[in-house]
Amino acid sequence: MKKFTKLALVSSLAISANAMAMQAMDDASLGATTGQDGINIGIGISKIEIEKLFIHDNDGLAAGSLTAGQAGFGGTGEAGAIYIKGNGTGATATKGIVIGANYGGVGGTEFLLPSRNLADLQIDSDAGGGNPFINIAAQVSGLDIHIGEIGVVASGDVPAADATTIRRGGQGTENAILTGLSVKTGPMTANIQLGAAPQGAMIKLNATMVGGLTIENLGILDNSTKTTTRAAGVIHLDSIQVTDANSRDLKLNQSISVFGEEGNDKGYVRIVSTSGAHDTYVKGIHLGSKTAASIGDMEVQGMQTYFSPAVGQYVPGAIITIRGH
């Protein structure tokens, strides 16, 4: 799970790298139009494409037990990488990740911001009563995200200082894990505070994703059954829809905090979610291959998770902790 979280973080960095497409208003211009000081940034990007993405684990899995199923079994201590690359179909024919606007809904604009920007940011700095901070209010348009094949491969050698490219990539056998997937989201808002965080966390998500969350064409691969004459087994899901219980939309109530080093604890990221119960509908479950007959659909109504801040106490929501090791 840690690796896939890193993939999400790297994808966010890829968006940030397109800073030249931003259009900013200075304090004076913003004050003249809104009567309020601050900075507005409109990120005018319509599509982002990434050819390949690698997350390298430089020390691999340390060799351990000789018994299958125990920790360290099969480990060599050699660098491996999770990769995302094109899967030869649709938007991801040659690209590993394609992120564009969600032009679905009424008139093709239902899931877009009024500005038609990918994101709009409103930035203010505040004295904070002696504990100053920067407040960033972010609005993000609905997104149409396509992700190609996800798998594992041996990491290539780190480029030498005099190499003509910084590319490292992978080498040898590639073992696919997911055939790919598509994700559609509605508009979202988040509030970020840097410096002090009087809101209680660095990032606060408190919004409603119009139309809920949709994941399409998700295929989970089993390479252990693959032979020279038989393709890898696949569990293929036509689509997954997630909404609030008894609703068409999805509320987002998350607090994201980054904890620093304390004693032997080197720090971690914590995500606290209190979004309530959810409905999930999985359409078209195919076992063996994408073209196998569907066994039907699956529906889960009103699923609610809980976490325990103390023994015997249950609070609706979930806490996810992410750290290196």
Image (cartoon, rainbow, N blue to C red):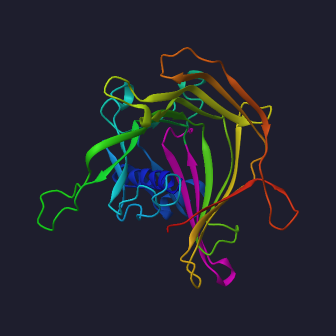
Residue at the spot x=61%, y=30% of the render? 240
In the rendered structure, which segment of residues is drawn in magenta?
A: 113-140
The location of residue 125, given as percent across then percent down, is 57, 71
| Residue found at the far right of this picture | 312
The verdict on residue 171 being magenta is no
For residue 111, which quarter of the picture? top right
For residue 155, which quarter of the picture? bottom left
The location of residue 320, given as percent across then percent down, is 65, 58
The verdict on residue 116 being magenta is yes
For residue 50, which quarter of the picture? top left
Q: Is residue 69 above or below residue 45?
A: below
The location of residue 44, given as percent across then percent down, is 42, 44
Q: Is residue 54 left or right of residue 32?
A: left
Residue at the spot x=19%, y=61% of the render? 159
Observer-nearest of 59 and 264: 59
| Residue found at the far front of this picture | 67
Observer-nearest of 249 and 198: 249
Q: Is residue 76 left or right of residue 161?
A: right
Observer-nearest of 184 and 34: 184
Residue at the spot x=66%, y=77% of the render? 128
Q: Is residue 146 above or below residue 105?
A: below
Residue at the spot x=72%, y=55% of the render? 318
Residue 241 in view (yes/no): yes
The location of residue 49, given as percent across then percent down, is 35, 40
Q: Is residue 76 above or below residue 288?
A: below
| Residue found at the far top of this picture | 293
Residue 103 in view (yes/no): no
